[in-house]
Image (cartoon, rainbow, N blue to C red):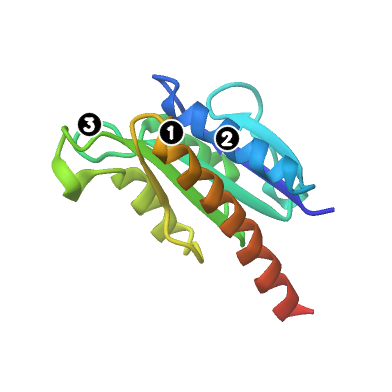
Amino acid sequence: MVSFLIAYASWSGNTQEVAELVEETLLREGMDVTVHRIGLGPVPDPRQFDAMIVGSFTWDKGATPDEVKDFVLDVGYKPDNVYVFGTGDTQFGGDELFCNAAVKLAKFYASRMAPLKIEQSPRGAQEQTVIDWAKGVLQQWKHSHALKC
């Protein structure tokens, strides 16, 4: 069974809602999922999972939150198969800074998929966007894994 680690940081609850929706989607697809809230408890070892999904909100003019930076340092290496999602708010910095933390993390990890960017909460029309992205992550993982076999 394919196993995913979802590690996320959330202050307002928006990023947590996205993480929960990604988790639900992957579970419905028959995947094994472990969720870790960044900043609480010991950092799981990504080597124990087939893929890692990192979620972050964007803070202070496009910055990555300190707790997410600390998580990256605690992991200590760049795992393969990392996918990234983020929440943000275009009213603070416009499109240029929107979900900039997710963009930076995806670039850092050389993610094979563009980061998912959610305006504030995943409710409403954005809920389907999250579900589609999570299914896309699974499809991308399966495709890349098939190429290695």
Dot 1 or dot 3, earlier in sequence: 3
Give residue 8's position: percent from left, percent from top: 52, 34
Dot 1 or dot 2, earlier in sequence: 2
Which residue, given by chain and number where applicable, does mark 2 sit on?
21
| Circle 1: residue type | Pro
Residue at coordinates 59% horizontally, 44% vertically from top-left? 75
Mark 2, secondary structure of its residue: helix
Disc 2 vs disc 3: which is toward the camera?
A: 2
The reply to whether discs 1 and 2 touch (Cβ–Cβ < 8 Å) is yes
Dot 2 or dot 3, earlier in sequence: 2
Is 98 situated left or right of 68 in this image?
left
The quarter of the image holding the C terminus is: bottom right
Which residue, given by chain and number where applicable, does mark 3 sit on?
60
Disc 1 vs disc 3: which is toward the camera?
A: 1
Give residue 144's position: percent from left, percent from top: 66, 72
Mark 3, secondary structure of its residue: loop
Residue at coordinates 24% horizontally, 40% vertically from top-left? 62
Residue at coordinates 65% horizontally, 37% vertically from top-left? 23
Give residue 33's position: percent from left, percent from top: 73, 40
Which residue, given by chain and number where applicable, does mark 1 sit on?
122
Distance CA(mark 1)–CA(mark 3): 21 Å
Distance CA(mark 2)–CA(mark 3): 26 Å
